[in-house]
């Protein structure tokens, strides 16, 4: 099955640069979501997604059509940018914490575990289905963020970006078997982290 | 099959990657072992929660900022001499033609005064060359601009290729107050989504695709604003 993004990249290489506009529009949402969920930070996600597109744009001439799927190439660039981001800045605290808690945060941020433990109590004071969804998002995002990077990355690519095992193995330069076992391991860790939440609901 | 390697097959079972023999062994162990059954149920439920995470919509600033950054990259990509010469060329032409016009007017006035016999001397002046500016986003573009800045004008053929709406990321109109930005206009699934895996056994619903995206960020911004406003209010 021909890959439309791959076709558009070929159009770019032939000088039809407006095809890049379409590449951006097709991939902006998945890319921003991937980075936001992996880094637990939607603001940084927009910056890094832009940077990913810029790098792709600059690399149009070097793009090898067919050698790797377009999505593999895109997520490879984005993953490397994310890893650099984690290395350079370190984690600046949780975005979703601020959005869910109702009190303004004081100077020193409490430990992540405490926040996860207290978050449902905060939000349960307010009624509504939307709040339930926010609470759920907060808890699940928190559980993802606690996973070590080498498990979190393949998990997000598989279960949020819906890449195939083969695509993830290409994206991360990992053997297929390693990719599969890391994803299963990541899901098992997630299961343990969400145990009390699932059993309570 | 024991408890440990049953756990190792959770994903492979859900992703339908096991051969028939292993599936039978897996299911046989689950029916015998209450602990593994409980863990597997928990595994499926937590995975469901993951799949139900709402989609985050990029902000409108995202598209605008990206447009500006891409335009900058395009300008950088133009050879240095062209970048320097294009505006200079335009300005020089304009300046030269201005001087020429002044000269012609002066000489014309002179000849008009001195001798009324030679009125054709005014034809030396060249027509002013239109100055060439570098456009980032403009409605109408010359052929030269099309070549230099192709991103600004997506062609009809490409638009029709993927059925896009008329407006483009690179052709953004200012948002009207009355209209909420319609991100659903870009409701395009990336290509890899079309290669859907077979839904695994049990109830792994891709429910998150249907849910409306929630922007938690808005709350965050509100809080930040309140927080920073507080000391100012106290000071006054
Ligand atoms: Zn067992």
Image (cartoon, coloured by chain):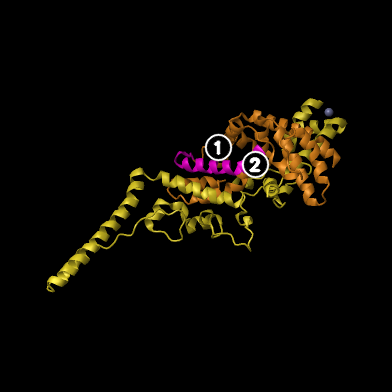
The answer to whether B87 is drawn above or below residue B101 in the figure is above
Please name which of the two marks, 2 or 1, marks the residue nearer to the observer: 2
State which region is magenta: A35-64
Residue B110 circle label: none
* x then y, percent, for residue A173: 58, 30
> How much space separates mark 2 and mark 1, taking CA atoms?
15 Å
Q: The orange chain is which one?
A: A
Element at badge 2?
Answer: helix
- Give the colour of chain B: yellow
Q: In which quarter of the image is residue A76?
A: top right
Name the residue furthest bottom: B116
Q: In which quarter of the image is residue A193?
A: top right
Q: How crowded is mark 2: few (under 14 residues within 10 Å), some or many (20 or more)?
A: many
Between B228 and B84, the one nearer to me in the picture:
B228
Q: Name the residue under label 1.
A: A77
Residue A36 circle label: 2
Q: Which chain carries label 2?
A: A
Q: Residues within 10 Å of mark 1 (few under 14, many from 20)?
A: many
Magenta residue check for B192 = no
Q: Quadrant of residue B187?
A: bottom right
């Amino acid at each position: 099955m021909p890959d439309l993004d791959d076709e558009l990249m070929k159009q770019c290489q032939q000088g039809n640069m407006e095809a890049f506009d379409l590449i951006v529009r097709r991939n902006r949402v998945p890319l921003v979501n991937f980075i936001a969920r992996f880094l637990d930070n939607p603001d940084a996600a927009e910056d890094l997604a832009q940077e990913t597109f810029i790098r792709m744009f600059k690399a149009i001439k070097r793009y090898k059509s067919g050698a790797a799927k377009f999505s593999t190439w895109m997520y490879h660039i984005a993953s490397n940018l994310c890893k650099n981001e984690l290395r350079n800045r370190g984690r600046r605290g949780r975005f979703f914490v601020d959005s869910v808690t109702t009190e303004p945060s004081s100077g020193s941020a409490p430990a992540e575990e405490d926040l996860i433990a207290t978050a449902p109590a905060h939000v349960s004071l307010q009624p509504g289905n939307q709040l339930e969804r926010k609470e759920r998002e907060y808890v699940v995002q928190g559980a993802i963020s606690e996973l070590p990077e080498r498990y979190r990355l393949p998990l997000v690519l598989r279960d949020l970006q819906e890449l195939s095992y083969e695509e993830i193995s290409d994206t991360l330069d990992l053997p297929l078997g390693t990719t599969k076992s890391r994803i299963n391991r990541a899901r098992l860790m997630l299961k343990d982290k969400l145990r009390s939440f699932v059993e309570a609901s | 099959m024991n408890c440990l390697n049953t756990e190792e097959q959770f994903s492979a079972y859900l992703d339908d990657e096991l051969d028939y023999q292993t599936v039978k062994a897996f299911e046989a162990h689950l029916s015998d072992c209450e602990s593994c059954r409980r863990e597997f149920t928990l595994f499926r439920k937590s995975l469901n929660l993951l799949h139900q995470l709402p989609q985050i919509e990029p902000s409108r600033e995202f598209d605008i900022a990206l447009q500006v950054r891409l335009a900058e990259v395009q300008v950088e990509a133009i050879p240095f001499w062209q970048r320097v010469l294009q505006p200079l060329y335009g300005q020089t032409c304009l300046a030269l033609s201005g001087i020429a016009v002044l000269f012609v007017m002066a000489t014309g006035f002179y000849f008009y005064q001195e001798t009324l016999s030679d009125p054709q001397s005014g034809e030396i002046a060249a027509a002013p060359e239109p100055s060439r500016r570098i456009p980032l986003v403009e409605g109408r573009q010359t052929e030269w601009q099309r070549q230099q800045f192709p991103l600004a004008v997506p062609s009809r053929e490409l638009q029709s290729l993927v059925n896009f709406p008329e407006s483009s990321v690179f052709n953004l109109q200012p948002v009207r107050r009355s209209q909420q930005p319609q991100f659903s206009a870009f409701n395009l699934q990336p290509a890899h989504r079309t290669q859907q895996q077979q839904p695994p056994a049990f109830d792994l619903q891709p429910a998150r695709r249907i849910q409306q995206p929630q922007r938690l960020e808005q709350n965050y911004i509100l809080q930040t604003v309140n927080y920073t406003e507080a000391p100012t209010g106290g000071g006054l």
